[in-house]
Image: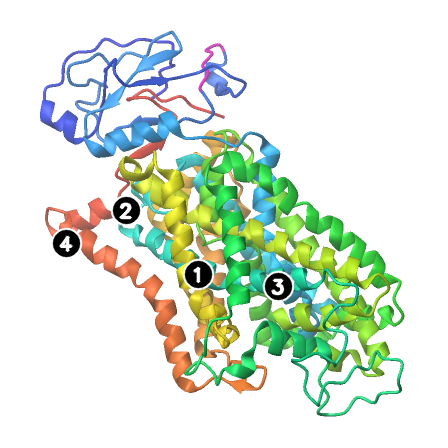
Amino acid sequence: ETEPLTSKKDVSDCNEGEDCKENGLLVRNPKSALRLVEDGNKVHPSQGDKGEAAQISNGYSGVQSSVPCNGMGEVEGAQCTAPAATTTSTSTACGAEGQQQLMELEDRETWSKKIDFLLSVIGYAVDLGNVWRFPYICYQNGGGAFLIPYTIMAIFGGIPLFYMELALGQYHRNGCISIWRKICPIFKGIGFAICIIDLYVASYYNTIMAWAFYYLISSFTAELPWTTCTNAWNTGNCTNYFSKDNVSWSLHSISPAEEFYTRQVLQVHRSNGLDDLGGISWQLTLCLLLIFTIVYFSIWKGVKTSGKVVWVTATFPYIILFILLVRGATLPGAWRGVLYYLKPDWQKLLATEVWVDAAAQIFFSLGPGFGVLLAYASYNKFHNNCYQDALVTSTVNSVTSFVSGFVIFTVLGYMAEMRNEDVSEVAKDTGPSLLFITYAEAIANMPASTFFAIIFFLMLLTLGLDSTFAGLEGVITGVLDEFPHVWSKRRELFVLILIIICFLGSLATLTFGGAFVVKLFEEYATGPAVLTVVFLEAVAVSWFYGITQFCNDVKEMLGFTPGWYWRVCWVAISPVFLLFVTCSFLSNPPELRLFDYDYPYWTTVVGYCIGTSSVICIPIYMVYRLVSTPGTLKERILKSISPETATEIPFGDIRMDVV
């Protein structure tokens, strides 16, 4: 177990040749070389082996058999010798699975630079929800007081799960499906569930970007089209209180920005609800087609290309947020919005729903459970400090959410000042409406409105694009790692097929009633399903794979073992955190309402069916696994919860201890 790479063993032929093949041990084969290339990334010797130097390429883990031939490292027809040189010829004798593992070791790409990975993860975590969801939830749940449950939930729930997924992906170097062979095979259905959830998200999330793209195109005019009531789509209730005339705001008044959003962009007045969606908007279809084209050419070559694109899509929003923050702070009435945003209501802390909202917000903001963190981390160098990455990216994400609140509420205070109303009346819009109605209207009535409109909707596009890159990369990496013999050399074709599937799946959201579909998918297709997936993932890793084994894996990568705080969070606190949020959601499902449309009861049933359609993969695969595994029931269970293949730095039966 402590034999260094530079030492040699006496070896002999295996006594049981068939067992060697069955257990997938490494045999010498000059045709398939696995090279240990000396580069800047070195395996640090343990305290007892400081004099023994050994170098390994960027985390290319060796394939170790789970059962040795005779306990002495002997393999069929070859010598179990660890050469002193830096080149070793190896292959597996377990058929397709061994070839798959070897292919992963030889061909797996890595990020060009560490900053590419960090920007990609930040771009994924910081999305449209940071701009509209956090500010709304914050002021709804006690303003400044909400930061207390939010911080607690982040420390004990969100960040530990974020760190866990980064460490899993980096150590095992696999996507969300095949990684379970190395952790707990019976839970492999989690990977398939994740892929289905990602497809659901892609089917509606990109439609929201299509709305933003429509606004962006409409902004290239001297006078923004949502500033007047003289357009073809306006009604008699349209009231422009920003006009120079003395206009009073009544109960039935509708702003020109709201009519532009509902009657021109969405055209919801041409739909009667989910039972009559109406036709497809060709304008939004073209916008979505262009967005998917951008996405395809950004991710078709892998992380080498997407890692460069995020230099723009992940950094540009921060430049715009800063500009909008400065502009908002100089508007009349901005202080009213900030006061409303941060004024603490300590009584709210006694309400259960506040803690549920805090847990849900930090969870969906950081985004474990979508396979993205596993995929991105799997392209890291083996000894990359993913612990530091988890702390940095989660902190940046939370700070961005908090600052976005100032960007939004300074403008809401300005709107309240102009309308001569309370901020609470102006801030009634939630979700996308907060951006496309309230904020768009405020921008339209600022000096240099065209400039601010263009950069604002460009910001929304870039916020959404890198999140889309990430979600699809989770699916791509998962499928390519699971079926390398089919797709490993055909990535561009697979990405094209995936983009086409996502586009066709989005057609329902492009109808005149598409906004109702987006709302339904957002509430039911992803929320409880992702919570269930991550709960089972945390249980599988902490209780089945074993918290001790997981911590040893982290030690091999980083040189130190996670402390008791992380262990307690992974074993108990984080699963309880997820169970708490899931049960709260299921016990009190949201009553959906959008504009003037109340969702009928049957839509709740449809929503739960959509959510269940992904999670059902988990028990189905468990049954399949137990049925297809030979042996008694006890043997089947034991085989199904034991890793099929180990992921370690060792080659053959030679382990290199890394501190």
Q: Nearer the viewer, mark 1 or mark 2?
A: 1
Q: Amino acid at mark 3?
A: Tyr
Query: What distance separates the C-alpha of mark 1 from that of mark 2?
Result: 20 Å
- Mark number displayed over residue 185: 2
Query: What distance separates the C-alpha of mark 4 from that of mark 2?
Result: 13 Å
- Which mark is first along the chain, 1 or 4? 1
- Label 2 environment density (alpha carbons within 10 Å; few <14, some 14–19, many ≥20): many
- Which mark is first along the chain, 3 or 2? 2
**Residue farthest toward the bottom in the current orientation of the protein:** 251
Q: In which quadrant will I find the N terminus?
A: top left
Q: Secondary structure at mark 1?
A: helix
Q: Quadrant of residue 428?
A: bottom right
Residue at horizontal 73 percent and vertical 92 percent from the top: 251
Position of 4 with respect to 455 (left or right) is left
Which one is nearer the viewer's eye here, 584 or 311?
A: 311
Q: Amino acid at mark 2?
A: Pro
Query: What distance separates the C-alpha of mark 2 from that of mark 3?
Result: 45 Å
- Label 3 environment density (alpha carbons within 10 Å; few <14, some 14–19, many ≥20): some
- Which mark is first along the chain, 3 or 1? 3
Q: Nearer the viewer, mark 4 or mark 3?
A: 3
Report the span colored magenta.
51-56
Q: Evaluate if marks 1 and 2 touch, with contact meaning CB atoms under 8 Å apart.
A: no
- Which mark is first along the chain, 2 or 4? 2
In this view of the protein, can residue 229 be seen by the observer? yes
Q: Evaluate if marks 4 and 3 touch, with contact meaning CB atoms under 8 Å apart.
A: no
Q: Which residue is mark 3?
A: 214
Q: Secondary structure at mark 4?
A: helix
Q: Is residue 52 magenta?
A: yes
**Residue farthest toward the front in the current orientation of the protein:** 232
Please tell me whether residue 616 is drawn above or below residue 141 in the rendered image.
above
Please tell me whether residue 59 is drawn above or below residue 576 in the rendered image.
above
Percent across and percent down for residue 278 are 45, 79
